[in-house]
Amino acid sequence: MRPRPRPPVRGRGILSGTGIILAVLTGTVVALLIPIWSAVHRPAQDADLLSARTVATQYGPLSELDRDFITSVRLAGLWELPAGQQAEEKGTTDAVRTAGQHLVQGYTFLDQRVRDVAAKLGLDLPNGQSAQQKQRLATLDAARGEDYDREFAGTLRLADGKVFTLAAEVRAGTQNSLVRALADDAGNTLLDHIKALEATGFVDFATLARDLAASGGPTAAGSPAATGPMAGPGQVVPVTPSASPTYPLPPAESSPPPRTP
């Protein structure tokens, strides 16, 4: 008599329940180990790059972002102080002229601070405005009346918002005590400028948000990369208010007139 074939034993084979469970567990372990292996064997490119761009000073490590910030504060003062002085003369309302006064006083203070910090860290600083900054001042110079007020408030609010954001980023992460103190002073001064500019009533916040989103990073517009430490930085000319020409002013108002559609 031919023996009856034995039925397959349930639970055996690669497709059995136990096999499926083992396969799933194996896949999970592999999925967990791959990222760990990649992290261990990944070249330390980012860390090496950061280390290469950070230099040691007696006040703590000085990063590339720190140096960019110092240069940005200096560049901001080179054109925003003259813009503020111009607004003191050309503004058609008390609020605009007051905002101009805040800019002049604030950047006179910040320029002294940034020159002191740069000298102690051995950093060179720019002495001239960028082409973009010169163009902004020319645009403001050509504007008159309420058009000037709106151009001044919008342009300066956008610029100070960028430097304010950069100051906050640097303050949050810098390891350098001089840069940290400068970021404190810059943040306080720029916040004062921002509030004074917004108090004019001429800041269009929808346009401001769009322009900030389109401009990218929080650096001073038109600012070149900061230079590294130098054996002997060149002479840095202080930014100081100078005599301004007089402009014919319409009757001053305490607040801007309603915007016509």
Image (cartoon, rainbow, N blue to C red):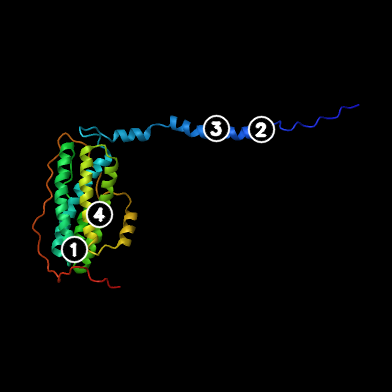
Give the residue at x 25% y 43%: 68
Where, quadrant-wise, is the C terminus in this rendering? bottom left
What residue is at 29 percent from the left and 42 percent from the top?
A: 172
Q: Tell me, yes or no, if residue 129 can be seen here.
A: no
Q: Earlier in the sequence, mark 3 or mark 2?
A: 2
Q: Which residue is mark 3?
A: 29
Q: Nearer the viewer, mark 3 or mark 4?
A: 3
Marks 2 and 4 close (CB-CB < 8 Å):
no
N-terminal of the pair, mark 3 or mark 4, is 3
| C-alpha span from label 3 to label 1 | 65 Å
Does residue 20 sit above or below 135 in this rendering? above
Q: Which mark is residue 18?
A: 2
What type is the residue that disc 4 sits on? Ala
Q: CA distance from mark 2 to mark 4?
A: 65 Å
**Label 2 to label 1: alpha-carbon separation:** 78 Å
Q: Horizontal placement of 31 versus 88: left or right? A: right
Q: In 3D space, how far apart are the residues under numbered discs 4 and 1 (Cα atoms)?
A: 16 Å
Q: Secondary structure at mark 1?
A: helix
Residue 90 visible to the viewer? yes
Amino acid type shown at disc 2: Thr
Q: Mark 4: few, some, or many residues within 10 Å (few <14, many ≥20)?
A: some
